[in-house]
Image (cartoon, grey):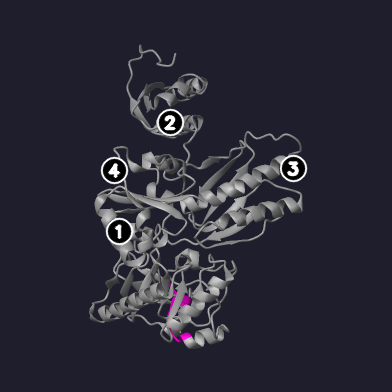
Amino acid sequence: MASELIINVAPWETRVALLENGTAVEFHVERAGRPGHVGNIYKGKVVRVLPGMQAAFVDIGLDRTAFLYVTDVYDHLTEFEHMLGRAECSDEPDELPCMHDDDADESKLHYTPPPFRIEDLLHEGQEILVQVTKEPVGSKGARVTSHISLPGRHLVLMPTMNHVGISRRIEDDSERTRLKEVISELRPTGMGFIARTASEGANKTDLQAEMDFLLRLWKNIQQKATSLPIPSLVYEDLDITLRAVRDLFTGDVQRLVVDSRQAYERIIHFIDTFAFDLKPKVELYNESLPIFDAFGIEMDMSRALGKKVWLKSGGYIVIESTEALTAIDVNTGKFVGKRHLEDTILKTNLEAAKEIAYQLRLRNIGGLIIIDFIDMSDVSSREKVFKTLKDALKKDKCKTNILRMSELGLIQMTRKRNRESLKRLLTERCFYCEGAGVLKSRRTICYDIFRKINRDAHSFMTNGIQVAVHPKIGDMLLKEESSFVEMLEKALDKEIVIVPRPEFHLEQFEISYIHLDREQKHPHS
C-alpha cells in the first residue's frame, strides 16, 4: 500500500497527515499554545489517595491533577508478576505505559481486579516519578503511570519491567525469534525492551546503539529528577514533527514531504542519527500551493468533522460522540439493492464496517464505541460483518478490542485513547445550541413566545405588545400562526406588533410592553 507522510509547519501549529493511496488515514496536530503532554515525565506529589476508586491524584504542575490507577503504580514488581503468574513475559506484551499502540497486545473488555490496594502503595505527600499516558480530555486531568517507557525508533525501553517483547505487527516467526534473541543478549539484567515494528530487519549494531542511547537517557532522567523541586517537568518527549518521524515513518512509507526548511533540516539530522537509510525518502516542499491543499488533505479534514458519512453504495453512517461513548448508526439511505433485502442489508453493513474502521482512525475516536448495524437475521451474515470490521481494524496502530455482534445488530468495542479526538481538537461547543447540536423548530419558538406573553402580559398596564424576532419566526407568526396571535390579542385585550430583526439568532426574541395609538393597524392584518 502506497503511503506518504505529509507535514505542514506554521508558527501557530504543526499538522501531520499519513496518507494511504492518496487518502488521509491519520491526522495529528500540535498547536503553539497547547503542547502535548503524552510521553513527558514529571516529578510529582500524591495529593489524594482514593481507596474507593483504587486510584490517586498526583500534582505534576498542570492545571488539573493527574489520575494514577493502582495497576500503574510501580512497587513490589517481583511479587506483582508472581501473583499474575508471569515469571517470564511472553512475546506479546500486555498493556504497557505510554506504549505506542502498534506494540500493544489485545486485552479483554471485562474488568480485572488489581492485585494490590492503592492505600498500601501510596500516601498523601509522597514524591513520585510519573509519565503521562493520556492527555487531559474535557474536564478530566491527564492519566499517568509510574511504569516509565522510553521509545526509540527500533526499541522501547521499560526500566521498571523485566520483559522482552516483540511488536505483534512483525509476523515472520523467524524474525521474531531473531529479535528476541538479540535483545535478550544485549539488554542489562532487569531492563525491559520491546522491539517496535520498525526494528524488523535491523542489525545487531543498530539495536545495540539505540539500546545504549535509551539507557543513557534513562540514567540522565533519574539524575535530573533528584535535583528538581516538586512538581517539575523532568523529561519532555519529542515535538510532533520528530515524533512523526520516529513513530510513523516506517519502511512502508514511500516518502516524507515537509514544507518548512527548518523542520526539514531537523528531520535530516534526526534520521542521520537513528535511521540513515530513510534519508533519500525525505523531500522539502517548495511549491506556492499550500501543501495540504496540494495533497487534498484539507478536504479530507473537513469531511472528518461531519456527523454523516456517505457510503459509495448510497448508504450512510452517523457518528455521534458523547462524554461516555461514541455511537455509530448504519443506514441503507439511498441504496435499494437489486435482489433480496438480506443482500442489500449485508452489502451496506460490509461497506459500513470498512468505513467505520477508517473513520475511527482518521478522527482518532477512542474509548467505548457502540456500532448499530442494520439488523440481519442470518448468523453467517453477522459473522461476515464482524470479521470485516476486525480485519479493517488491523491497519489501526491504536489498540482495539471488539466483541461479536449481538442478535440486535450491535457491536461493542473499545479503542485506546491517549490524545484528544479530531473533533475535540478542531471544534468547540456551539454557543448557539449549547452543545445540543440542534435548534428549536420555528413552531416551538412561536409557542414559547405565546406562553411567555400569556404568563407576563397581565402584569403590565399597557395596550400593546411588541415582539422582536428573527425574520423566519416573524414570517411564521404572521402567516401560519396568525390565528393564534389574534386569539391571544382578544384574550388579553392587547395588540401584538411583530418586529423582524435580521441580526437576531433564530431562537432569540424580545417582548416589550408598550402603549399604542388605538388608530394603529395591526402589523399582521
Mark 4 vs 3, N-terminal side: 4
Q: Which mark is residue 342?
A: 3
Image quadrant containing the C terminus: top left
Q: Residues within 10 Å of mark 1 (few under 14, many from 20)?
A: some
- Asked if marks 2 and 1 touch (Cβ < 8 Å), the reply is no
Mark 2 vs 3, N-terminal side: 3
SS type, badge 3: helix
Q: Which mark is residue 286?
A: 4
Calculate the distance from the C-alpha at mark 4 to the C-alpha at mark 1: 17 Å
Q: Residues within 10 Å of mark 4 (few under 14, many from 20)?
A: few
Q: Which mark is residue 268?
A: 1
Q: Say above or below: 42 vs 449.
A: below
Calculate the distance from the C-alpha at mark 4 to the C-alpha at mark 3: 52 Å
Calculate the distance from the C-alpha at mark 2 to the C-alpha at mark 4: 64 Å
Mark 4 vs 1, N-terminal side: 1
Q: Position of residue 131 (x, y in %)?
A: 37, 71
Q: Nearer the viewer, mark 2 or mark 1?
A: 1
What amino acid is at disc 1?
Ile
